[in-house]
Amino acid sequence: MSGLTVRRVAPASTRTRRIAKAGAAVAIAGALTNVLGYLVPVIGARQLSSADLSALATVLGLAAIASVPGLGLQIAIAVHRARNGAASTARISLVTTAVSAGGLLVLTPAVVPVLDLPVQYPLLAVLATVPTVYAGRRLGEMQGDQRFLRLAAGMVMLAVGRYGGLIAALLAGAGLTTSLVAGAVVAWLVPPILLVLCHSRKPPVADAISGREVLTACSASLAMLVIAWADLLLARYLLPADTSGAYSVGTVLTKGALWAPQVVTVLALPRLAQGNRRALRLALLMVAACGAVLVAASALFGGFAFRVAGGPDYTHLGHYAAVFAATGAVYALVFVLVNDRVATGTKRAAAPVWVACGALVVVAEFFAPHSLEGVMWSALGAALLALALCTIGRTKR
């Protein structure tokens, strides 16, 4: 027996408890992230005019889209780390951050007239983008190492940094501009906190992450976030200010159904990178079940959902609640499939989502009525198209 190495395998019950503990921690962190994100428009609906509420939602959409490379950076680092081990991440993280913030800065002169925003709003979004994108470096390292308890804490810190200052300023009765300034300033506290939290002593053992890996993940993440926010931006562009403000309240339900099962994708990604097909099937089943529950609840309590999201002035839109929730639920399934495409190295992983996004813009602009209902149904159709294309692409692999 002297030449044999004995490996101790944790009992199934112990592994189950660990997974359950990690899942609970990430779920709580994701829920808190969503709550803080939803509090911004909910508080804004009670503190701001309909026009300012629409502007706030639009700025949040721009900041979310500009920050998407941070999510792509996190996914790329997590996938590479789970598959190959620790790798150098400093240079690619700085480059990704510079490109993200610089891109929004360059586009600001075009964004201001198209979305009818004061110039300082996109510039404040640029300021908040830098720390948010760079946070993807540390979150990806923790996710790839499957240190999910630390990852959960990091997710909470990022959420507090992104939304804490904005929420505090709105509650204090500050105007929209002051609130956006407070949000951007607080966001800069996130990177140093995550550096301390991550505290990895693992030396790099794999090659540095390539720009192609990050570009693929960023393209997929950008496509997912663009299509998730595209209907709100289209509403701002196509509809009167009051109607687009009402639409922004409905999208709170969409984002709720979209991000509620986020924990499933977070936990599954490292296993998807290792080629675990059972993890994909289980993830899809759990996300679908969560979506079904949320859509049913929205159908039964639509008026209450709109009252919670925007106040009593929006209760009459309750009969649309199930449609907004269904759009988010379908996108949640799409996001699982797109993450699987990235994790398994599928070429043009984001192509189905970009096609659906283009279809949404064309249909909403040229075919659907320029009304709340027209944009709403166009968004649901785009979600279903993306799901169909992702499913077809998977069956052909």
Image: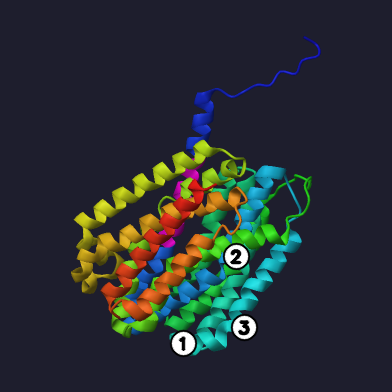
The kind of secondary structure element at disc 1 is helix
Q: How far apart are marks 2 and 1 (CA)?
A: 23 Å
- Kindly identify which numbered label has been placed on residue 106: 3
Question: Mark 2 near mark 1, Cβ–Cβ under 8 Å?
Answer: no
Badge 2, how many Cα within 10 Å: few under 14, some, many 20+?
many
**Relative image position of residue 1 (x, y in whole percent):** 77, 9
Identify the residue at horizontal 40%, vertical 53% (top origin).
260
Residue linked to disc 1 = 114
Q: Distance between the residues labelled 3 and 1?
A: 14 Å
Badge 3, how many Cα within 10 Å: few under 14, some, many 20+?
few
Q: In which quarter of the image is residue 307?
A: bottom left
User: Disc 1 residue type?
Assistant: Val
The answer to whether residue 193 shows anywhere in this view is: no
Sequence-wise, which precedes: disc 2 or disc 1? 2
Residue linked to disc 2 = 69
Question: Mark 3 near mark 1, Cβ–Cβ under 8 Å?
Answer: no
